[in-house]
Amino acid sequence: MTLTITAQTISITSIEQLNELSGENVKLCMQCATCTGMCPMTAEMDLSPRTVMHLVQFGMLDRLGDSNTCWKCASCHACTVKCPRGIDIAKVMEALRQHVLRTNRNYIEPSALPAERIAELPQIALVAAFRKLTS
Amino acid sequence: MKISYYPGCTLKSKAANLEAAAVAALATLGIDVEEIDRWNCCGAVFSLTADDLIHQVGPVRNLVRAKEQGATQLVTLCSMCYNTLARANRIMRDDAVKRDTINRFMDEEIDYAGEVEVVHLLTFLEREVGWQKIREKVKVPLEGLRVAPYYGCTLQRPADVGIEPFGSFHLMTGLLEALGATVTPFAAADTCCGSYQVLNGEAGARSTAAVILDNAAASGAEALATSCPLCEYNLGKQQGRLLEAGQITTAVPTFYFTQLLAVALGVAPESCLFDLNSAASLDLLKTKNCLVAA
Ligand code: SF4
Ligand code: SF4
């Protein structure tokens, strides 16, 4: 993907907001793609974790809003423990989710879950999914 | 010896087998399990945004309960509870500003500053009991049972709360060897099972689970040991569906490590609640003569 950097595509405010939410410095990313290599969920993601980090570095929240990547992230921290730049990518993914969830939107609808699924799933699965994917 | 124990929600229902086997096994080792009073849900996952302190209140309240009861260690079994409690504990110990805010918010509670250590049972067993003592207490060695030690994510990541360094599997390996089992290391031992993504389309969690089970089978494992009820769901309860769909070809019955510990120590299988595992799990132990004679 080619990114053209102009005053319109780069958003300093969004970068600052993501840094603040995640507690990370996304500018440290050197685009090595170790995170993508470690990630167990890439088959489900439309953008790889590395690509997300690239867009994050420009604060392109609109473009990221169309992507399912942060929603398919399982918060497994496999990327985090291997990033050579010491970035906690799992926290950046959470910041992207929270950016949406804090506007009172859900990614999954708890009420749409069939009763038999709820009866079968362990409590930690339900609590974890609602914590990560609903507002 | 008495230990303070935090069970967590799932161990009181869907994963009652994880708890029941642990309590029975520890009793044979002379260890009393004392559940902390008025515990609440830990939140299952640690909040990863820097400004979100309200979700730390739940886990910290449990730590306050443990401190009130004079505990210096709080033992957990569920990997996710372990991770969430241990990470919240790090904040209370190391971050003065957040600690102060949380303590002031919970002004009905005593102040807390990370005094209690959150300990996973695997760590506790190695540190306070030792593999040698466990080996001596084994009544039914798990001889000929080839077990893959599966850690998943939350026992090891991130590094500051990992029960051992990323990529090392000594604790579960040490325990399984002490029980007489043959340990079959495998590359996917710390690959995520798909976790809560099972509620978000399921396909993703199923394919990661298939990778893990395939890899375990290829390494020669005939059983998989875990300490996480969500891993057990994705890898164990869903396994029949994976076999049916042809996503995996070999069954690898799953167990909680506490169940393997208990049967080896001579605990009756009924006390390990194998009816909460898939049927293949108990069948495998029967075939391998790993159960105490009735
Ligand atoms: S591993 Fe770290 S430095 Fe490499 S692409 Fe991912 S975030 Fe950037
Ligand atoms: S934390 Fe998320 S992005 Fe990172 S490896 Fe795990 S699933 Fe992939």
Image: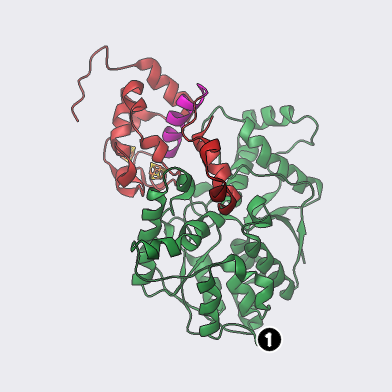
Figure coloring = by chain
Q: Is residue B267 left or right of residue B232?
A: right
Q: Colour of chain A?
A: red
For this orientation, the residue located farthest to the top is A7
Pick the residue in front: B89 or B28: B28
Pick the residue in front: B244 or B150: B244
Magenta-colored segment: predominant secondary structure: helix
Q: Is residue B90 above or below residue A65?
A: below
Q: Is residue A2 left or right of residue B53?
A: left
Spot the green chain and give its letter: B
Magenta stretch holds residue A97: yes
Residue linked to disc 1: B294
Badge 1: few (under 14), some or many (20 or more) residues near its Cα, within 10 Å?
few
- Residue A8 in view in this figure: yes
Q: Which residues are magenta?
A: A88-104
Q: Is residue A66 left or right of residue A103?
A: left
Q: Residue at x 53, y 49 (%)?
A: A117
Image region (quadrant) for ligand 2: top left
Q: Is residue B66 above or below residue A112?
A: below
Where is residue B153 shown, x and y percent of the image? 47, 52
Name the image quarter holding residue A14: top left
Amino acid of disc 1? Ala
Please count the marks in the image. Answer: 1
